[in-house]
Image (spheres, helix red, strand yellow):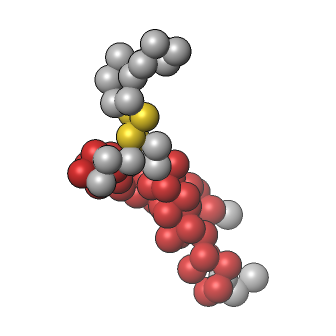
Amino acid sequence: MKIYIFVYLGTALSALVCTPVVILIARRLNIVDAPGVRKVHASCIPRIGGVAIVFAMLALTIPLLVFNGE
């Protein structure tokens, strides 16, 4: 049971670390949603922000599934 807590906390920490990197990449590659008349946001918002969360989740969940001895 402790391993699942480790995976959860590790995923949260990995997502916190990866998100600024993905935001930087999105801005450099111009993968952003620009503000406009029909938009609510006032600044450019990266469109690939969920990639950091998925990457963090997979990076710790896959090894758990592969190497778990249960």
Please identify the quadrant where the N terminus is shown. bottom right
Residue at the (30%, 54%) spot, across then down: 29
Q: Position of residue 54 (x, y in %)?
A: 55, 58
Q: Is residue 9 visible?
A: no
Q: Is residue 32 visible?
A: yes
Rendered image quadrant of residue 14: bottom left
Residue at the (67%, 79%) spot, across then down: 65
Q: As drawn, is 18 to the left or to the right of 63? A: left
Q: Is residue 43 above or below residue 21?
A: above
Q: Is residue 3 above or below residue 50?
A: below
Front in this rendered view, residue 52 or 66: 52
Residue at the farthest front position? 37
Front in this rendered view, residue 22 or 43: 43
Residue at the farthest right position? 70
Q: Position of residue 20 (x, y in %)?
A: 30, 47
Q: Is residue 47 above or below residue 21?
A: above
Q: Position of residue 28 (x, y in %)?
A: 24, 51
Front in this rendered view, residue 48 or 19: 48
Q: As drawn, is 34 to the left or to the right of 20? A: right
Residue at the (51%, 49%) spot, across then down: 50
Q: Is residue 16 above or below residue 7?
A: above
Q: Position of residue 18 (x, y in %)?
A: 35, 55
Q: As drawn, is 28 to the left or to the right of 17? A: left
Label tally:
0
Q: As drawn, is 28 to the left or to the right of 26? A: left
Residue at the (69%, 86%) spot, across then down: 69
Front in this rendered view, residue 54 or 31: 31
Please identify the quadrant where the C terminus is shown. bottom right
